[in-house]
Image (spheres, rainbow, N blue to C red):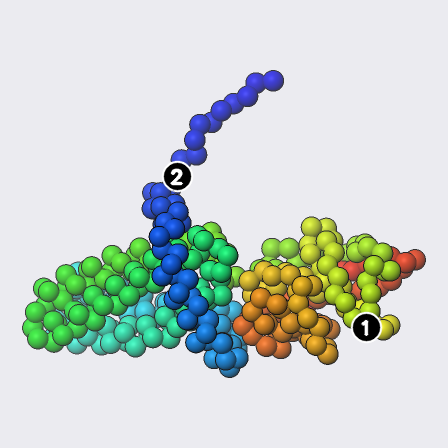
Amino acid sequence: MTTIDGGPRRKTPFEPLVDQIEAADGLDGPARAIAARVRQATAPTALKEALSGTWLGHAAHPLLTDVVVGSFLSTTLLDVLGGDDGGRARRRLIGVGILASVPTALTGANDWGDSEYGNDPVRRVGLVHAACNAGALALYAASLPARRNGHGLRGTVLGLGGATLLGLSGYLGGHLSFAQGIGPDQTIYDAGPTDWTSAGDAVDVTDGRPARVVVDDTPVLLLRDGDQLFALHDRCSHRGCSLADGTVDGDEIECRCHGSRFARADGAVRRGPASAPQPSFDVRERDGTLEVRLRPLPS
């Protein structure tokens, strides 16, 4: 047999920088302290749900970042390309970006605080991401009085510095979302079998106690309540914790990690911070074996 050695994998241009950040354990001390305060400050349910996007159906932070980045970068584009001779539009764009930075920072900090515990790369990259955002905000904010006082060149230079930090921050934010999986529905890539599939012996599911089984590589929570059987995707859509490790409270199941609650009957979100429902399954018992299939979404 011939073995082909392709050599070391070629890294993307910014990957070495991300690797260094993820390995920087010196960031852990301040990051943990900040994250603990964020979780404490966002603990109230109504605030938590608002910041997490429970009302929206997905995370609120990405939507808000577009407003900030769009406003600030539009300012810099007008600096470079012209078309705003009096500078009024640029000043207004900076003002919009500054105002939008407040809810954007709050939603981002909330999402990071829910994700950094036990995850060193997310903790460290998230802190640097936030620092870059703060730096960009400070530079654009400093450019505003410069522009108002007639120091257009200084305002432009400060804006270019802010745009550079925004670019780095955006790259790190993309890494957190698309490489580390922070924000997307954690059940989206393995919703479960669409045909009736064995989920184990019925005797293994005792009354009132959630049981976790794996069906065609999909973790499924099974729950018996008298003659009724319920089945949900076991991986919490919020941050991926096992719902079987949570608690059953009436007709709801509460995740042990962040307190999200889901209806046992159909997986609907009853309380955040989760924003996406749990996939639910039809369940039947045949000859002592439980079978499940993914319940189609209502039309």
In the picture of the structure, the residue carrying the numbered disc 2 is 11
Of residues 9 and 114, the one nearer the viewer is 114
Which quadrant holds residue 11? top left
Q: Is residue 117 above or below residue 57?
A: above
Residue type at mark 2?
A: Lys
Residue 156, given in percent of the width and then of the height, sits at 15, 64
Which quadrant holds residue 139? bottom left
Which quadrant holds residue 192? bottom right
- Quadrant location of the C terminus? bottom right
2 and 1 marks in contact (CB < 8 Å)? no
Residue type at mark 1?
A: Asp
Of residues 169 and 115, the one nearer the viewer is 115
Q: Residue at x 85, y 73 (%)?
A: 226
Please identify, in this view, whether the residue under mark 2 or under mark 1 is nearer the observer.
Answer: 1
Direction top: furthest residue? 1
Residue 184, given in percent of the width and then of the height, sits at 52, 61
Residue 190, given in percent of the width and then of the height, sits at 64, 55
- Quadrant location of the N terminus? top right
Q: Which element is circle 2 on?
A: loop
In the picture of the structure, the residue carrying the numbered disc 1 is 225
**Is residue 142 toward the left or the right of residue 105 in the image?**
left
Direction left: furthest residue? 150
